[in-house]
Each structure stands twice: as C-alpha cells, then as structure tokens.
Amino acid sequence: MAQCPKCQRTTTVWNRDVLSGVCWRCRNQAPAVRLGLGSLFAIFVVFQFAIWNSSTRVPHATATQVGNLRDQVTSLEHRIKKLQSSVDKLLES
Ligand SMILES: [Zn+2]
C-alpha cells in the first residue's frame, strides 16, 4: 500500500502512476497529452526490450522479425517526436 502525494488517499502500487506516484484518480485528471506520451514511451520501452531480447537471448529469431520490430520502433519514435513537438508548442503558447 502507498499514499497518493496529491490527494493523500491510500492506493495500491498497481494503481499508482510509475513516474509521479499519484493514484489513478489524480492521474486521470492530468492533461491527455501527458498520458499519451507516457503510454507511447512505455510501448517504446517494450519494443526496445523485445529487440534487445531477440538479438541477444534468442539466436534463432529471424532477421525478418527483428527488422519488423525495428520498423515499428522507428515509427513509434516518429510519433513520440511529433507528440513531443506538439507538447513543446503547447507549452510555448
Ligand atoms: Zn490521488
């Protein structure tokens, strides 16, 4: 059990936000852009791990599979960069 730093309510570790530590209620009040970036980043990390895993631990993974994952990560990187620039624009204005 943990406590939300924002509303002081008791929350479980699974219902907390990994980065800020706030509960899901407070997290849902956060701007949608931040949530989108967070989930995209999580997907990105998972794909990075998948590539690392397939290239180091599973030698029989085909080059096609690794190539597909790399393509997916590249498109995610583009989406994250786009989101980041739109967030920057929002913050500037
Ligand atoms: Zn809270």
Image: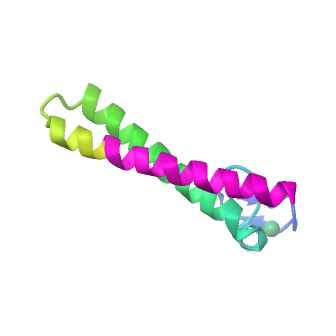
Seen from the viewer's position, the closer of residues 27 and 10 is 27
Q: Is residue 67 magenta?
A: no
Q: Give the quarter of the figure containing the C terminus.
A: bottom right
Picture layout, residue 61 above or below residue 21: above
Specify the quadrant of the image occupied by residue 22.
bottom right
Q: Which residues are magenta?
A: 70-93
Colour scheme used in the picture? rainbow
- Position of residue 89 in the picture relative to residue 18 (left or right): right
Residue 91 % position (x, y): 83, 56
Picture layout, residue 18 above or below residue 29: above
For the point 26% across and 46% down, the residue is 68
In this orientation, does residue 21 appear? no
Would you say the magenta stretch is mainly helix, strand or loop?
helix
Seen from the viewer's position, the closer of residues 4 and 1 is 4
- Position of residue 82 in the picture relative to residue 3 (left or right): left
For the point 69% across and 64% down, the residue is 33
Seen from the viewer's position, the closer of residues 49 and 64 is 64
